[in-house]
Image (cartoon, coloured by chain):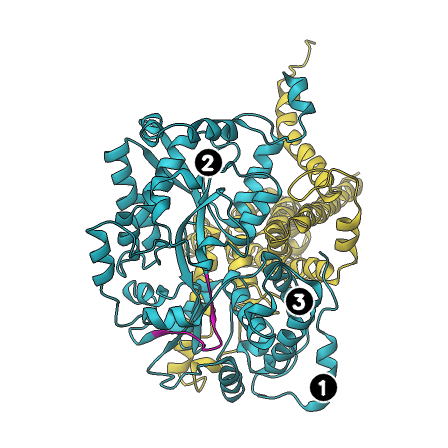
Chain colours: A yellow, B cyan
Amino acid sequence: MHRRSPLPLLLAALVALPVLFGVAYAALAVLGLTGAGATGKLDWTRATALLTDRTTWRSVSWSLYVATVSTAIATAAAAAVALLFPRQMRTDRIARSLATLPLPVPHLVAAATALMVLGQSGLLARLLFFAGVISEPGAMPPLVYDRAGVALIVALAWKELPFLAVVGIAMRAGVSRDLEDAARTLGATPAYVARRVVWPLLWRGLLPAVIATFIFAFGSFESAVLLAPVDPAPLPVLTMERFADPSLARRGEAYGLALIALVVGAFAVAVHEWTRARWGALVK
Amino acid sequence: MLMLAACSTDRNTGDANSEIAALRALPWDSVEARARGTTVTWRKWRGDPAINAYVDGWIASRLRKRFDIRLEAVEGQGPEIVNQLVIEQEAGRGRGSASLVWVNGETFANLRTESLLAGPWAGVLPNAAYIDSASPIITRDFEQDPAGYESPWGTVQFALIYDTMRTPNPPRTFDELATWIRAHPGRFTHDQGFTGITFLKMLMYARGGGVAAFAGGFSETRYAVGRSAVFALLDSLRPGFWRSGSTFPPDVAAMHRLFANSEIDFSMSNNQYDVVNKIRQGILPATARALVLRDGTIANTHYVGIPFNAPNPAGAMVVANFLLSPEAQFEKQKPDVWADGTVLDVSAVPEPWRTQFATAEADPRAVPRDTLARYARPEVSPQYHERLSTDWLAWVRSGAGARRPASRPEPPSEILPAMRQAVPSDSRP
């Protein structure tokens, strides 16, 4: 057996080092040791101000809510596409293509489109007005800059769907036909096969992508800045707001918020690892 | 050498400062000779196509032909400029990425505090002789002495924007505006950015004893008085704001869009001529007009500065001098170019520019020059802006008023005391 090449380790370091440096820099900046407005002395005021500020936690919870709901919608839709249209028939192929259509659309374009379609004077409001559903375009319920985050959730889910659908479709195609046939031969109904054979295999393949899209949605700035309300502010928007605060002393707080976002992301990854470990144990 | 650098008390004594010191001693044509064949990278706000066209087209082509300078304008404004320079400063010695930055107000204050600007150099520009040095709006940047660390480029004045078709008799004072908002719930808002905070600062002047009450540096006690006046009025008006004041448009562009789509009846801009520009671009309706409130509207000047680590200070000085030339200032002022006010004393510039400035036709859609001048008010210490901006965000996020329906024009008197309590107690310095 020959020695392992150090190349993979080097490449891994190349990926990990910027993150480690970033975390270290952010920690120094939030403690007032570096960055704009830093005094160079250890100073806990930024960190305590952040952690005790209601705005921070409202922002974190709102971003969690938006990321969870949009990812749930996209996951459900992607799974439905994969499960309902698995065959090589024409209708199935068209359905699969349609689900992956938004893939090349940039997030910024998706968000701007949501703004134009779902705004109170937007396309949807005008259509509903002409259809006589609402008395005036202004009577449209606010979907943009609203606290329910409807337009933001729609835009994020619409952009997440194709990514999850591509993974889901590939996973579904990977489920061996023999496995399904075996189950059917043993007397399982098609619904039972879908629930106990196809779905667990699909879900295990889909989960990493779901976690990735969740973290992406949680940290998405460009859609949030266009569609979210000022209160509660989405975490990425609040972070940028602090980073551009007219008062230099406050800019360090942006790094604290970035670290909070990192903790949330790390937690999501941990949940994923834990779930996979549990699956591993079940197989044994 | 490294030891010396480490021991130096001023960690910013970079090359640009010493180079500028050397350039100051040279005759101007030697500065121009040094700038020949170089590139000047200019970090500036790139959000307006009209400004970009003027800079990338008109200015850049003349710099190239006359001075053999390549001008490269890159994106970056206010806080981004400060953050970028802080990062470059931390990264250590060596030249930075930009030789010229477009700044004013709190950005200038931040850059000066952190010693991120090189200078003084603005006084040696030959065209600086034409600057309107009698105007306090030009010679003071948010009450700060530019001290040669920035050179004026243009002036703007705040204006409300309304549609003559929708609002034939617009309010002319803050009191009339308050009455109008109460009578038309859901039709007024301001943006969350610089323009919106400027609007609130004008409100602070109007309700807090005029600009004189806030002049002469930041005062905690005077701010406390102004702040309570501003937020008391905002509290009482909040139910009448667009979306009941639960949210505000993120920026002026979003506010213009809401205005153009008739979701609100007023927009606003930090440039009195913006309305003419935006009508031409088809963003605002042709019947839109600017409006100057009789309580006074804030006018300020924007400047260009040279970063402490500028790779090309000589080129930057030549560009700054050209920006100040009567020719470039006249072009910039044209309504169909940018419509940005000049910083020159137009009676002092040489011919033919004196006649050109004197006979320049004002756009009939714009607010007349004498009206603008009469109601212009200077900026005060940038700290007022910072504090209002922080306190306003805290106010919005306090959640008061958000749960009230938009249709209710006035809150019942019994909940007013509760709303007052929602005014932020104090913000950090």
Rendering coords of residue B394 (x, y %): 67, 66
Q: Would residue A11 be visible to someone looking at this image?
A: yes
Q: Is residue B428 shown left or right of residue A122?
A: right
Tell me whether the residue at label 2 lies in contact with that at label 1, contact meaning CB atoms closer than 8 angstroms.
Answer: no
Q: What amino acid type is highlighted by mark number 2?
A: Ala
Q: Quadrant of residue B65?
A: top left
Q: What amino acid type is highlighted by mark number 3?
A: Tyr
Quarter placement of the C terminus of chain A: top right
Q: Is residue B77 shown left or right of residue B316?
A: right
Could you say which is closer to the camera, residue B315 or residue B267? B315
Q: Quadrant of residue B216?
A: bottom right
Q: Is residue A140 above or below residue B283?
A: below
Cα distance between the residues tagged 2 and 3: 36 Å
Residue found 39% across the figure and 36% down from its top: B317
What's the chain of the residue with tag 3? B
Residue found 67% across the figure and 90% down from its top: B412
Tell me whether the residue at label 3 lies in contact with that at label 1, contact meaning CB atoms closer than 8 angstroms.
Answer: no
Q: Which residue is mark 1?
A: B415
10 Å neighbourhood of mark 3: few (<14), some, or many (≥20)?
A: some
What secondary structure is marked by label 1? helix
Q: Which residue is mark 3?
A: B223
